[in-house]
Image: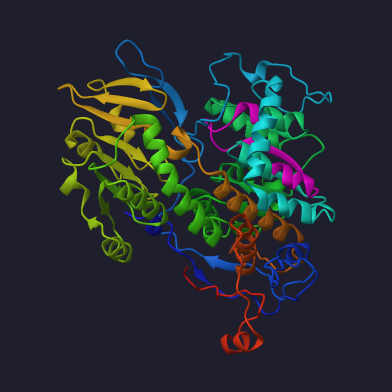
Amino acid sequence: MSDTAAEAKPEVKQASKEVKESENVAEKYSAMTVSKNSEINMGELSSVFSAVPTHKPVKKQIQFVEEKQEFSRFPTKTGRRSLSRSISQSSTDSYSSAASYTDSSDDETSPRDKAQVNSKGSSDFCVKNIKQAEFGRREIEIAEQDMSALISLRKRAQSEKPLAGAKIVGCTHITAQTAVLIETLVALGAQCRWTACNIYSTQNEVAAALAENGVAVFAWKGESEDDFWWCIDRCVNSEGWQPNMILDDGGDLTHWVYKKYPNVFKKIRGIVEESVTGVHRLYQLSKAGKLCVPAMNVNDSVTKQKFDNLYCCRESILDGLKRTTDIMFGGKQVVVCGYGEVGKGCSAALKALGAVVYVTEIDPICALQACMDGFRVVKLNEVIRLVDVIITCTGNKNVVTRDQLDRMKNGCIVCNMGHSNTEIDVASLRTPELTWERVRSQVDHVIWPDGKRVILLAEGRLLNLSCSTVPTFVLSITATTQALALIELYNAPEGRYKQDVYLLPKKMDEYVASLHLATFDAHLTELSDEQAKYLGLNKNGPFKPNYYRY
């Protein structure tokens, strides 16, 4: 199966010619002229800077699941666990920051029951422990060192405050890297209220540092399901404050505002969404005619797909597996389910360390790519009894079923690199005949009656964010894209964006990439006037048409 199949590329339609060009702060900060010394001239404006509306076909309706499912969390004497929690895809994707100084079990008192104030006397936040702010500030400062492009954008645009008047409510992973994004938005003039898109993702000390710096943040590691929705509601429902922009990761925040605060939702000026699940939800609303605000699809931007999905996973898959299992990859037989950008990154990394890699695919184009890259394309059932490691990265559900889990060999490692936690049928393993044994943080041995053990990582949730960390530099690319998308939507003249879902302008993608080239001391070649005329291009870009596939 393929994450490219699950994330079918939308057909691109040209923006209306009737939209008049106008002065736009976002255009100014995305205008790019490459001089001989490869520096960017911020003084020139791009002639056309409009996102392209898209319509992504939704083959399957994405439901907003609110039902709860009973399953085990803490080992009992029999090895089984129990905890009632929603199976909302985005909110239950596990993420445990390896960099976090604190653990959710340090203090059993719920942050909701604590009275905390920061040094300025404000109590408009809810974090684990405000006293951890100093540690969190160090984490943020470290992250800033490898997010120079985002810091550069902050410095260039800070004096003109392109987000002045913007009231952004955000729901993302709250990590040191995200904190750099949040503080950039504040520096550009925005007021922000923030919560976590995942009950396990928050670095407590980073949340404390944000709260100490005046950001209204409501999040802590190890939230309950009730806590999760309470935090979202506290961000949205604040006396004397009403959001006009949404930055979401997974769609839970957008769904909450749409369902609980419809009048607020109608007044939102723009939504920026970066995840597969959240984008599907937006297209579902658009198809039903219920999306009454413009939205920007960051997930399918070039800078997200080709960098975050590919290069990030190429490095973090190895990190996650090593930290949890100490596995030696040389000679191991591994099957990667899905050969989209995530699958390509995982397969390349494993092959480079000597693993024998198989690929499963539903898409003949992706399958052919895998074959040309030297991988054998198989059906999972053909190798299920042979492989040592199974990695899912399709964005689909039930990619690995209970029947297949029953037929795996002893010691097989099973993990997921896709966005949602539905790819491995973990629920089917929570039965009386099977014993769960927690051997490490985020590592469970599921033991069959005959003694066979399957090693399940992160309970089938996102491996790299659950069991390791991801490269800060890659997150800088995504964060810069998100910031520019917010600037564009907030400053766009009336009529530029309809009640639809849009892809990022090509100019914006190129600008984000150009900001990060300085890290590598890369020097772009300039087109001569004759060359530009021959190709029919503007010398300053964009250099590729919207339909170009990188």
**Horizontal and vertical percent for residue 507?**
64, 68
Query: Any magenta on residue 203?
Result: yes
Query: Any magenta on residue 150?
Result: no
State left or right for residue 429 relative to residue 166: left
Name the residue located 28 percent from the left edge and 35 percent from the top edge: 413
Name the residue located 64 percent from the left edge and 47 percent from the top edge: 147
Name the residue located 51 percent from the left edge and 36 percent from the top edge: 91
Count all numbered tags in the image, as a single digit.
Answer: 0
State left or right for residue 225 relative to residue 72: right
Q: Nearer the viewer, residue 313 or 350?
A: 350
Quarter the N terminus occupies:
bottom left
- Is residue 275 visible to the viewer in this orientation of the structure? yes
**In the figure, residue 490 lies in which quadrant?**
bottom right
**In the figure, residue 121 lies in which quadrant?**
top right
- Is residue 126 visible to the viewer in this orientation of the structure? no
Vertical relation: 79 (above or below) 95: above
The way the protein has been coloured in the rendering is rainbow
Name of the residue lying farthest toward the top: 77
Magenta residues span: 182-206
**Horizontal and vertical percent for residue 79?**
31, 16
Vertical relation: 24 (above or below) 474: below
**Horizontal and vertical percent for residue 5?**
37, 59
State left or right for residue 143 relative to residue 103: right
Name the residue located 74 percent from the left edge and 19 percent from the top edge: 116
**Horizontal and vertical percent for residue 416?**
37, 41
Vertical relation: 105 (above or below) 461: above
